Image (cartoon, rainbow, N blue to C red):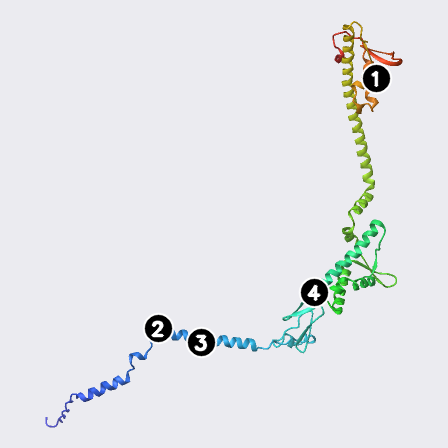
Amino acid sequence: MSSIPKKRPKPNAKPPSSSSSSSTSSLSSLMEPPQSFFPSTNEFLRLVAVLAIAIIVALGCNLLATTFNRQPKPFCDSGDIDSPDAMSDFCEPCPSNGECYQGKLECMRGYTQHGKFCVEDGDINETAKKLSEWVEIHLCEAYAQFLCDGIGTVWVREDDVWKELDGHELMKNGGLDSATYIYAKQRAMDAVGRLLETRTNPRGIKELKCPDLLVERYKPFPCRIRQWLTEHALIIFPVCVLLLGCTILLKKVRRRQYLSSRAEELYHQVCEILEENALTSNSINGEREPWVVASRLRDHLILPRERKDPVLWKKVEELVQEDSRVDRYPKLVKGESKVVWEWQGIKGVPKCFGK
């Protein structure tokens, strides 16, 4: 038991003194940041908004600087169309109706540059259109006059048209220079050549003519009517004759019906007058003649406009002649021979309408 070594007792730890605790608290206060060091939530949101606005302004300034300072790409030369550089991003393709050389674009005559394209000049196009319309009207009216009256020209030389266009009012008042007007005139003649008929005479001169379908629009209306009647004369003449014959036949039938009805009406009036005259002459003891002069009776009954037509009274005379109750005989009246009519029917019983 004596061989077991004895352990040395550890010295007891001493409690911390007040001076050491105060130093530790001061050190910890120095190491921790104050509460006012970190921003609040509102301050943090304001900071984010300011940073966003700054970034947007910086990007906008960079975009504007890039846009205004960027140099436009040159045009690819017209002669280098087959070159691989012509379709590259280093140059713009040369537009149609334009010629490009050393990166520059030059539009052909009659076209103006608008950005990367060559568009047609409106003034030249309008002038060419007016000139072509003037040539069309001039040639078609001359051809129409030839077809209607036999006066005018059919084929007109192109050189003569060129000379007339030189003196056109658009040459003086169109506002175009000489070279531009010549180009507009050439375009007008090209359009006219596509619209009108052309030929080359034996002298080798080109001539123009208004097409037959187009010239119909320029013929005067009386000329169209006259030509239409001439073309359809073989049909129109028989139709007109047939219509005229039908009209004459209808007129004759209506006239015959009128004469027949009017003659019967006059005949009945004659019978009444003769019968009344016979009754009156018997009642006054023969102081009045029982007969009536036929011509006086005619003038009394027939209207003045009907006296010009002798056929009407002849029909009345025929009806009277067929009536056995009326006697007709000549009589000397005041020294003149007259035909008189006398009623011989039953007195007082009118039977004229019962014939």
Q: Disc 2 and disc 3: Cα gap in Å?
A: 19 Å
Answer whether residue 63 is visible to the viewer in this image.
Answer: yes
Amino acid at pointer 4:
Asp
Q: Rounded to the nearest whole Å, what is the CA distance between mark 1 and mark 3?
A: 132 Å
Read off the residue under disc 2.
42
State how far apart marks 1 and 2 are (Cα): 138 Å
**Does 118 appear above or below 258?**
below
Q: Sequence-wise, which precedes: disc 3 or disc 4?
A: 3
Q: Residue at label 3?
A: 54
Q: Nearer the viewer, mark 4 or mark 2?
A: 4
Residue 344 position, x and y percent, is: 80, 8
User: Disc 4 to disc 2, how far (Cα)?
Assistant: 66 Å
User: Dot 3: what SS?
Assistant: helix
Q: CA distance from mark 3 to mark 4?
A: 52 Å
Residue appearing at x 44%, y 74% in the figure: 53
Marks 1 & 3, CB-CB < 8 Å contact: no
User: Within 10 angstroms of label 1, few (less than 14), some, or many (20 or more) residues?
Assistant: few
First in sequence, mark 2 or 3: give its number: 2
Q: Badge 3 local density, few (<14 within 10 Å), some, or many (20+)?
A: few
What residue is shown with label 4?
123
Looking at the image, tell me whether mark 1 or mark 3 is earlier in sequence order: 3
Mark 1 to mark 4: distance in Å?
A: 92 Å
Identify which amino acid the numbered label 3 is placed on.
Answer: Ala
**Where residue 102 sits: x, y (%)?**
67, 78
Quarter residue 100 falls in: bottom right
Report the amino acid beneath label 1: Ser
Name the residue furthest bottom: 3
Residue 234: x and y, percent? 83, 40
Q: Earlier in the sequence, mark 1 or mark 4?
A: 4
Specify the label residue 295 is tagged with.
1
